[in-house]
Amino acid sequence: MTKNKHWANIEERGSLLGMKLLFAIYRLLGRRILLIFLFPVVLYIYATGKAARTASRDFLTQVNYYNGNKKSASWLAGLKHFLAFADSAFDKIDAWLGNITTADIIYNQDGVMQSIIENKKGAIFIGSHLGNIEVCRALSQGRYHIPINVLVFTENAIKFNEVLKKAADNVSVNLIQLSNIGPELAISLQEKVNQGEIIVIVGDRTSVSVAGRVVYSPFIGKDAPFSQGPFILAALLKCPIYWLFCLKEGKKFRVIFEHVSDELALPRKQRTQVLESFINLYADRLSFYAAKYPQQWFNFYDFWQQDQAVSRKESNGESKQ
């Protein structure tokens, strides 16, 4: 039986050249004109990308059920979902270009970053692919002089930032690519935290290389696999932990910091139980906001698939089951 692909092995649609072309149109003619060019591109990708289209509509349907609406998501709802994802890329550009300012931001806790600076010890922010945390990164560069280290799982994120730098000269963020969280990385990140820096990692993607190191937690009414790695890292760093969300509301963005713990301890005898409980907390908050802002959910694959039932690939291209 053919296994589903792991999220990291799903082929990216579109080319780097295409991205550069769209960015050129954006810089030359503006965002409104860009949408005229962008719509047929997104429509084509949506019409021809069966796997992502199905994942989108399955997710939106599950949200409907979770919210008490028994209707399946329509084809149009799925298209709007894809358009929202495309639009979010240009929110990132706008943020770095200064077209999104602090006047466009609604903070639930405006003093979090300043508190971290004053305490002279860093923190770890656990985000997700819900909303657009890139906006937070861009705004913090100008408002708070505090280094931000973003852990990314694939080369695609780094390539996007290379294009981003050409569009916005002030893009300055430390991207750290990782496939696994090992002792050397943990030591390096600990040093950064001790120097007052911020670590950002997402908690809604399973391991690129290893199957089974997950906790199945309720997410919008169904158990989904969540990687243990980001949460183990949070415990190793022995620093304050926050959930981070940046969600678009009309033309404004709501930035949500939720303080979770001053430090996560994983006692040896209760390690599994404490870790599961902590991941459950994350899944619960992710569920809450995903159900409220479903069009901003940007995981276009079967999020509920069994982690052991997907096909991973080693760096040499061979499949790892």
Image: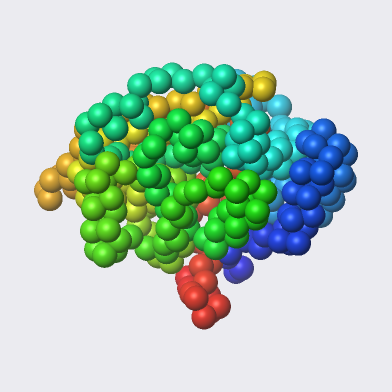
Residue 263 vs residue 226, the one in the foreground = 263
* Horizontal relation, residue 163 to residue 213: left or right: right
Identify the residue at horizontal 48%, vertical 34% (top origin).
142
* Horizontal relation, residue 22 to residue 245: left or right: right
* Horizontal relation, residue 49 to residue 108: left or right: right
Identify the residue at horizontal 26%, vertical 65% (top origin).
184
Could one spot residue 43 in this view of the protein?
no
Residue 28 vs residue 217, the one in the foreground = 28
Could one spot residue 126 in this view of the protein?
yes
Residue 321 position, x and y percent, is: 47, 70
Residue 74, above or below 299:
above
Identify the residue at horizontal 71%, vertical 27% (top origin).
71
The answer to which quarter of the image holds residue 80 is top right
Residue 243 position, x and y percent, is: 38, 33
Q: Quadrant of the N terminus?
A: bottom right
Residue 122 position, x and y percent, is: 28, 40
Residue 110, above or below 6:
above
Residue 198 position, x and y percent, is: 35, 42
